[in-house]
Image: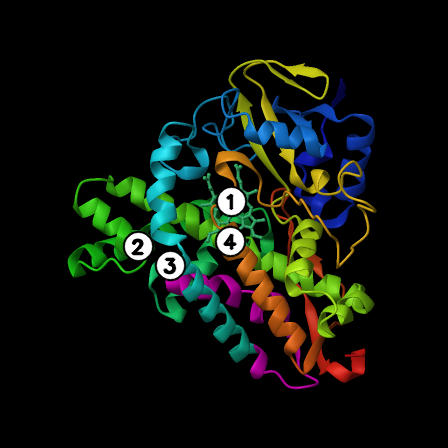
Amino acid sequence: MLVVENSPLYSADFFAVDDPWSYLSDLRENHPVSIHRRSDGYEFHALTRYADVYDAYVDHTRLSSAYGTMIDGSYRPEKDSASGRMLIVADRPEHTALRRPIKHSGFNRNMLDRAGRTVRRNLRAVLGELSVGDRIDFDKVVAPELPKGVLEVLFGIAPSDARTLLEATRTMIGYRDEAYTGASPLESLVDAQMDVLDFIDDLIGQRIEAGSGDDMIGFLAGLVSSGDMPRDVALLNGLNVAVGGNETTPHTASLTVDTIHRERAQWLKVVAGDVPAETATQEFLRWTSTNSYVQRLTVADFPVGGEVIPAGSFVTLWNMAANRDPAVFDHPDSFVIDRQDNRQLAFGAGIHRCIGAPVATLEIQTFVEELAAWDKAFVVVEEPQRLRSNFMLGLTRLPVEVVDAKDVGA
Ligand code: HEM
């Protein structure tokens, strides 16, 4: 099995300025299971084939999430501090007990409908304010409107509070990028995490007093009041939803605009109504693969891809490599806006499959629909700046100019 010393997969810079897609493609074709070491002794196995990544996602007995799902999430094979109490780092049976109330409170049909309407309203407002000739950073002006609308509904908060919360979660995930943190990443990470937890704690406190349960926070506050959920568990899961929701879809939206710019001829098929927004959305999700990988720890020997990964090993499941596997996708390295039977793995699989997948898909689809119906269009006018992160693929700067839609062929 290939062993890579000082692997670039650890390097945020490699993901910001180099070509991680080709590197992972090469691994998938030649070394589908490989080991990646760092000089300080950290080591993980990398899975890059669709079938192996999928098998790992659904093997809930041999692979544990409780030791952190990010590289360095838990430095030694020790449980994450939130293990068993926060969805993403809980195994069965704790995971089942947590997922049910959270799904029921925040991810039901009613919340989805309300979130969709709020996102559409916010997007129309922000797009409606733009005039031909305006130059903006899409990443700062438009992208945050997607999760903002969801937060307003799920957390029952004002748009200005939703913006504040968004900024804090952004620092948590992008803490290795100076665009968010300045010079002291770890301090910024801890400060931001405390800010988010304080914010959610205040909200839960207010709802317990008010006794209202019309949204996710209200429902969790009800469980805390009745003694059915400890307050720290409600807090941690509020944090999980806020981070999961805020730090993904804006990056997908920015990369979507960049892709539209590069693939204008294909995009015009959506504008003309020849390709449904739903189909295009699935391809944007595959193509952008915003959450590049997740990590697990093997708690028993794990046979995969013709190898056996010993118990006690970290394993990374590379969504971005699986989503370009030629065994599953024709022309995997091409963006194909009307791709059929798109089994993209952007949201993972198995019991941890993104709880926000329906709302995230709705956000992106609503964005696609609103852009297609807009009488204007975005043209990228400077090279976009990629996020310094090996975990989230996104942009920190996307300079665009607003032009008349007719000028780009619509
Ligand atoms: C394009 C957008 C998104 C992508 C690519 C994405 C990706 C993922 C992936 C790959 C997982 C699985 C993690 C694992 O197996 O360890 C996950 C889990 C999760 N996501 Fe998302 N996500 C997105 C949007 C959202 C949104 C909008 C929310 C909430 C509003 C959200 C909340 C969560 C939560 C709470 C989990 C943990 C679920 C569990 O462990 O049971 N995500 N997401």
Residue 223 relative to residue 58: left or right: left
Q: Which circle, 4 or 1, is nearer the viewer?
A: 4
Checking the image for residue 354, the label placed there is 1
The part of the image, by quadrant, that contains residue 208 is bottom left
The answer to whether mark 4 is within 8 Å of ligand 1 is: no
* Magenta-drawn segment: 127-153
Residue appearing at x 16%, y 44% in the figure: 226
Q: Amino acid at mark 1?
A: Cys
**Residue 330: percent from the left, percent from the top?**
81, 45
Crowd band around label 2 with a 10 angstrom C-alpha radius: few (<14), some (14–19), many (20+): many
First-in-chain label (4 vs 2) = 2
Q: Is residue 11 visible?
A: yes
Give the spatial CA distance, label 3 vs label 4: 14 Å
Give the spatial CA distance, label 4 vs label 2: 19 Å
Tell me the residue that label 2 is attached to. Answer: 217
Secondary structure of the residue carrying tag 3 is helix
Q: Is residue 325 above or below residue 238?
A: above
